[in-house]
Image (spheres, helix red, strand yellow):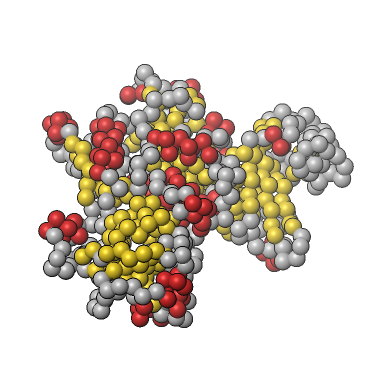
Amino acid sequence: MFGGHVFGGAALSSRARTSTSINVFFGFGLRIDLEYRIYVATEEFITDAGDTPPSQPYSGALDEPMDFEWSMPTSGGFGGFITGRGTTIIDNSDARFDVLTQRYSTDGQPVEIRLGKVGTKVADWPIVFRGLSSGEFIDDANFEISIEDHGYKFDVPAQARVYAGTGGLEGNEDLEGKPRPLCFGWCESNITPAMVIPTELLFQVHDGRVQAISAVYDRGAALTFDQDYPNVAALRAATVPASRYATCLAEGYFRVAFLDVQNGAVTADVRGDITGGAFAETTVAIVRRLIRRSTTLKDPEEIYVPSLVSLDLRQPARVGIYISHDETPTVADVIGQLMAGIGAYAGFRREGKFYVGRVEDPQGPPTKRFDKHKFDPNPQKKRLPDGIWPPPAKWLIGYGKNYTVQTEVAGVVSDARRSWLAAEYRYGTAEAPAIRVDHPFGRDPDPVPGFFRDKSDAEAEAARRLALYRTSRGLYSFGVSDRDAALLNVGEQNFIRHARGDLVTGRYMIITSIQHKAGDKAAVIEAFG
């Protein structure tokens, strides 16, 4: 099927081709030091000798370039971790790919889809999708490949290092297999540390260097600080005076000195990770720190840096998150929680780079403009998520999270402190009673479990969401050509104009989902605005 010589970028057929093609690069790793690669396209052609890859034939066996969907979560408004999954289908009627079921596995192999015209350099074709295969199904007719975006790189434990349970700094058998705790940002909020060596009253708050262990409590009563030691060996060898605590900030440990330790009674206030000497204290800084620590993603090469810079400028509030030894979230889980707490989103762009953004009042400029001549089918209005329709008249955003709720505390604990210890969150509030007049059946959304340190930042976020969701908004679904949608990403703004409803004069809208069906030359977009 492939030509045996260079065709100078022309189609394999002698007839000139000027139509648009979609090509897939799909690579397989073998158990020996070789690679099995598949180059297929919607039309047969061969690349020019000066292209990348050079002089490479592409068969025209690509039946369904991609049927793929990206979607933004909608709990309590829009925001969270965007997921993307789909399929690619290659023709197998000539049995050429039957051998794959016998010798190879596609799991975890890279997939790249580009869009371009035969006769132009493939290396210059824009990337429509870059991700990986998560499995395959091969029968007499088709070779169907399941594909995912690079979010799989975040489907890993936020903390891979666990206690062995063999004693010493590996903890006793109660800690066997449990992850070492992680603390990022401002966690001066009563965390429960891991008791690593009970006989030495040695606790760990973070798997690494922390900025401060600013307080330690016994049943809510503060102990007096003794001193910091340069390493955990010195801390273990020290004699800690009664009713005091000593720290090893360099390795995230502390010790206490008293006789009666009740399970869960020892808690601490911590300012977390300072890897490289830098204290990560904003949402973006913590996300980036977690990515570097717990994933294989390359920073900054595989990150769309402008999006992180922009979000850090828009939301510079101090935050903190503690992942205890009793929790096993993935990196995606943690990032999703942090993003939802500030009304933002995170995911992977089409070209495979990690990006973030915040759901805001769309004002432009748009990535693309759509009008009545470009829709198939026409825009259809959809119901808004229950959390934002009817418009909420009141928003509660959490701050100052108490990681260890306590009701049985020492007698010396003040009433104010007892009240604080009895509740998990305090809330910043924004309210507009006038909304209830217009929407008397509206319901307030559930409180948002934010990670803010300060009340003022929680109140500011509550006010922002109140303003964002109180005005007349719509959620629309509309069809466009796959090529119109080919380079769009969830979270980007478009301008939509149509002859019906509240789109007559046009409005800016934020893309909340994309279903790209390249085989049907179509895409369905959902947008909010």
State the residue at coordinates (39%, 25%). Answer: 363
Q: Is residue 28 left or right of residue 521?
A: right
Q: Where 8 falls versus 111 (above or below)? A: above
In this rendering, the count of numbered labels is 0
Q: Residue furthest right?
A: 5
Task: Choose between 8 and 212: the one closer to the eye.
Answer: 212
Q: Where 280 falls versus 137 (above or below)? A: above
Residue 13 falls in image quadrant = top right
Residue 194 in view, yes or no? no
User: Where does the C terminus fall, quadrant-wise?
Assistant: top left
Q: Is residue 95 left or right of residue 300?
A: right
Residue 480 in view, yes or no? yes
Residue 88: x and y in percent read 59, 49
Q: Where 385 falls versus 179 (above or below)? A: above
Residue 173: x and y in percent read 41, 81
Residue 386 falls in image quadrant = top left
Residue 183 falls in image quadrant = bottom left
State the residue at coordinates (21%, 65%). Answer: 221
Task: Choose between 504 and 449: the one closer to the eye.
Answer: 449
State the residue at coordinates (67%, 50%). Answer: 26
State the residue at coordinates (58%, 59%). Answer: 135
Residue 446: x and y in percent read 23, 48
Q: Residue furthest top?
A: 505
Q: Where 370 falls versus 91 (above or below)? A: above
Residue 336: x and y in percent read 40, 50
Task: Choose between 100 and 492: the one closer to the eye.
Answer: 492
